[in-house]
Amino acid sequence: MQQIKEQDILHDEYGNYYEVLAVQKDGDKVKALEVTNLFFKETFKTQAAGGEFSADSVLAAMNDRIAQVQQAERPIYALGDLLMNRIAIYAMDVTKPFSDSLA
C-alpha cells in the first residue's frame, strides 16, 4: 500500500472511482492523498476540450482510464482500506483548476 502514486485509482464501497492527484509522505510512509472524483475529472476534460457533455461518453472515458491503470498492472485501491491504514484522504478543491492541466 505504500507504493501509491499520482494518477493511481481508488474506489469506494458505492462504486465511485477517484484519481490520486497528490501524495503526501513522511519519509517512505504515505500519510495523505489528495483525490478527485474520476467522473467529475473526465466531465471537465470533455468540456474543456470543447466536447459536448454526454454521460455515456464520459462514462466510456472513465472506463478507459480504469482499463489503462489495470493494463499498467497498477492496483485499484479500496478507499476504506486506506482509511483503516490511517492514510488521510482529501478531496480536491473543485473551485480551483486541475494542477496537472488535465493530463
Image (cartoon, helix red, strand yellow):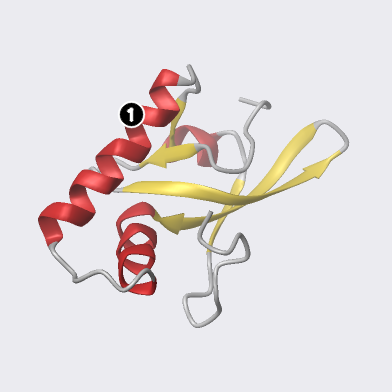
**Residue 63 place in picture, x, y as percent:** 26, 39
Residue linked to disc 1: 67
- Classify mark 1: residues with Cα within 10 Å, few (<14), some (14-19) or many (20+): few
For the point 53% across and 66% down, the residue is 92
Compared with 12, 43 (above or below) is below
Measuring from the top left, give residue 77's x and y in whole percent.
46, 31
Residue reaching furthest bottom? 95
Dot 1 amino acid type: Ala
Q: Residue at x 35, y 35 (%)?
A: 66
Q: Is residue 20 above or below residue 78?
A: below
Task: Please provide percent x and percent y for residue 91.
Answer: 50, 63
Considering every residue shown, the one lying at the far right of the view is 27
Q: Give left or right: position of 101 versus 56.
A: right
Q: Residue at x 57, y 64 (%)?
A: 101
Query: Height in image: 75 above or below 5?
Result: above
Q: Quadrant of residue 43?
A: bottom left
- Callout 1 secondary element: helix
The quarter of the displayed image where residue 52 is located:
bottom left
Q: Which residue corresponds to the image point at 47% horizontal and 75% vertical from the top-left?
A: 94
- Along the line of sight, the residue nearer the viewer: 97 or 13: 97
Residue 103, percent across and down? 53, 54
Q: Is residue 77 left or right of residue 56?
A: right
